[in-house]
Amino acid sequence: MIPLLDLKREWREIEAEVKESWERIFASMKLFNGDNLINFEKEMADYLGCSYVFGVGSGTDALLLSLVACGIGPGDEVILHANAFVADVEAVKWAGATPLLIDVKEDFSLDLSQVEKVITPKTKAMLVVHMYGHPLNMDEILEVCEKYDLILIEDASHAHGAEYKGKKIGTFGKVGAFSCGVVKNLNALGDAGFVATNDSEVAYKLNYLRVHGQVKKNDHHFYGFNSRLDEIQAAVLRIKLKRLDEKNEIRRRIAEKYTEAFLGVSGLIPPPLDDGNKKSVYHRYVVRTDKREELQSFLKDKGIGTGIYYPIPLHLQRAWKEAGYPEYRLPVSEKLSKEILAIPLFPEMREEEIQYVIESVKQFFGA
Ligand SMILES: Cc1ncc(COP(=O)(O)O)c(C=O)c1O
């Protein structure tokens, strides 16, 4: 069996170090706002090359707090793309704003030519997701945001450590929101997330939004949320952050092997290659084929796990309709949702497993 992701292998590598740091936490019973949170935020800000990082309870919270901290709320519209995750549209909804969806291109990136079609005077922000760890073309995105005076929020949940022109993904927008959920490249052992920003006003808001707007003990300056990154998870993230670059490098090497083997296989489209400006971190290795279901079940029979991210685009989810949002036809997102399949790619994969995945995929296509 080769699972899509095997968390047990990484755990074995870090178990002793994590348990040691947990021992220290439990000895002090300082479970929140301790050294681990403070140091994680510093270390992550250094790593990203940004001014401020704030730990929060999850990636979903990171998105919601980002929107609220940027002053986005009722009466505002936010543009996002239809192949994003449901948390992206939920954050817009619970911030009180209205989502406007645009389609994507075949390389999974948002189709910026569609911005003009949906934008109105109420449109205040654009929320972009670096799908599967592939950096978006930030020059183009920043140009559009400048042209239409839109606040840019990046969802970098798939893209810890990814770069565009040598700059870390998640630091281009007013805020970068990151999930550190258990399957992410930088993953806690439970729910966790953080936000990154260079804007001091937004930073002030974010810092207190996560603790009920409490600026001093019992002194609440605005209404916020309860969304903290606890010491137990912050300790795990500090340990894993030290290894993130090395792990991402291994992901890139596995992806290279896959892509080299799959280029030229008729009926199979490998994910986009990095151009000279981009450094992907392959959170997922997503191939495309019009025989997706058949490939998935063939691989299952071979003992290979796969996943679909995401099989139903945002505008075709029942929740979208229930929320009273309008009907859209977004042909590329709809087509991709039927073709995409993630195959196993995680840093602890063994060489024989990588080769077995390659052989099995090629065998399916008769290559
Ligand atoms: C792109 C993206 N954004 C946001 C989230 C939400 O993160 P969390 O599960 O930590 O709330 C996820 C989770 O899978 C995600 O993939």
Image: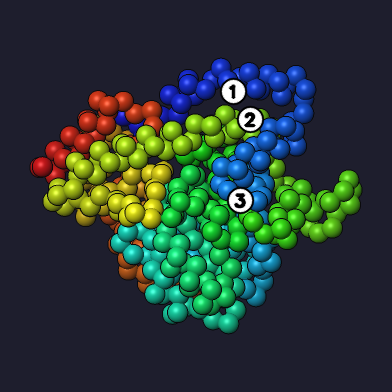
Residue 39 visible from this viewpoint: yes
Q: Amino acid at mark 3?
A: Cys
Q: Residue at x 44, y 54 (%)?
A: 164
Residue neighbourhood size for the residue with mark 3, other residues' Cα within 10 Å, grouped as few (<14), some (14–19), many (≥20) = some
Horizontal and vertical percent position of residue 316: 42, 63
User: 49 and 25: which one is in front?
Assistant: 49
Which circle marks residue 312 in the picture? none
* Lower position in the chain sequence, tag 2 or tag 1: 1
Tag nearer the camera, 3 or 2: 3
| Residue located beneath label 2 in the image | 235
Horizontal and vertical percent position of residue 61: 63, 51
Q: Amino acid at mark 2?
A: Ala
Tag nearer the camera, 3 or 1: 3
| Residue located beneath label 3 in the image | 50
Horizontal arrangement in the rendering, residue 319 relative to residue 82 (left or right): right
Tag 2 and tag 1, C-beta contact below 8 Å: yes
- Secondary structure beneath disc 1? helix
Q: How many marks?
A: 3
- Secondary structure beneath disc 3? loop
* Lower position in the chain sequence, tag 3 or tag 2: 3
* Lower position in the chain sequence, tag 3 or tag 1: 1
Compared to residue 112, the image places residue 199 above or below, namely above
| Residue located beneath label 1 in the image | 18
Q: Quadrant of the N terminus?
A: top left
